[in-house]
Amino acid sequence: MDIIKSIEHEQLKNKIPELKVGNTVKVHARIKEGNKERIQVFEGIIIKVQGGGINQTFTVRKNSYGVGVEKTFLVHSPLVEKVELVRVGKARRAKLFYLRDRLGKSAKTKEQVGARIEDREIVIKEDLVEEPVVEEVKTTEEVVEETPVAEEVQKVEEAKTEEAPKTEAKAEEVKVEEAPEEAPAVETEKPVEQEVVDTVKEEKVEDVKDAEDAK
């Protein structure tokens, strides 16, 4: 999409009134007078609808005190508050310019008998208000899915904490079993220490005897 088209698309109204040539309508338009703003109603017959997109316009004609007055409105203008249908008329042309040359009753279109007077609207852009609700639903589903995972992680951690004392107890049992194997090595070393002590004592006795002989 071009940049210009994207900008124009943002300026479009979500809904516009259904406009048909020959219908009598009341156009509620905003008018600013200084710092004040009011709504002015212009009632007349739609004599033409032209253009498309953001440039679409429609022209309304009425006779005021014997003088013909025409006003052209932009369909997507924010100054157009609403368009109210008053009467449904018969028209077999796209543009009713022949009404400009007529006066009195002949300056109006014939009324279509039995037609329903309803203010119908055409949807151009759909409202995107419902999308955030869908996202919120998705987030709640994700939270619901994440909670069982968190519970499983807690169970695994508890199982590890329970296994840790068991492994420590097994390690202590293995150390206790290895201790008696080192005992015989200690017993073999004791006689050696006793022999060393005896030799020392014998040396001392000889020294004593030599000392006595010398005397």
Image: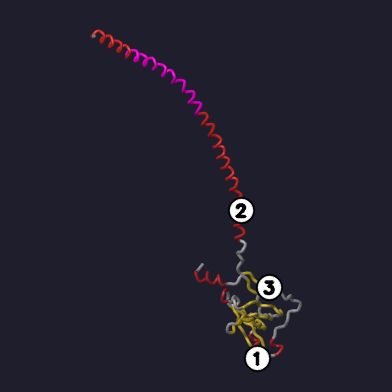
Query: Which marked residue is nearer to the observer: mark 3 or mark 2?
Result: 2
In depth, the one of 116 and 205 nearer the eye is 205
> Distance from label 2 to label 1 (Cα)?
66 Å
Residue designated by label 1: 67
The reply to whether residue 95 is in sight is no
Residue drawn at the location 63% of the way across and 71% of the way down: 15
In depth, the one of 166 and 24 nearer the eye is 166
- Split into 4 quadrants, where in the image is the C terminus? top left
Q: Quadrant of residue 92?
A: bottom right
Q: Which mark is residue 140?
A: 2
Q: The residue tagged with tag 1: helix, strand or loop?
A: strand
Residue designated by label 3: 120
Furthest-right residue in this view: 114
Task: Give the answer, above or below, for where 68 lies relative to 50.
Answer: below
Tell me the kind of residue under disc 2.
Thr
Residue drawn at the location 63% of the way across and 77% of the way down: 81
Q: Quadrant of residue 33?
A: bottom right
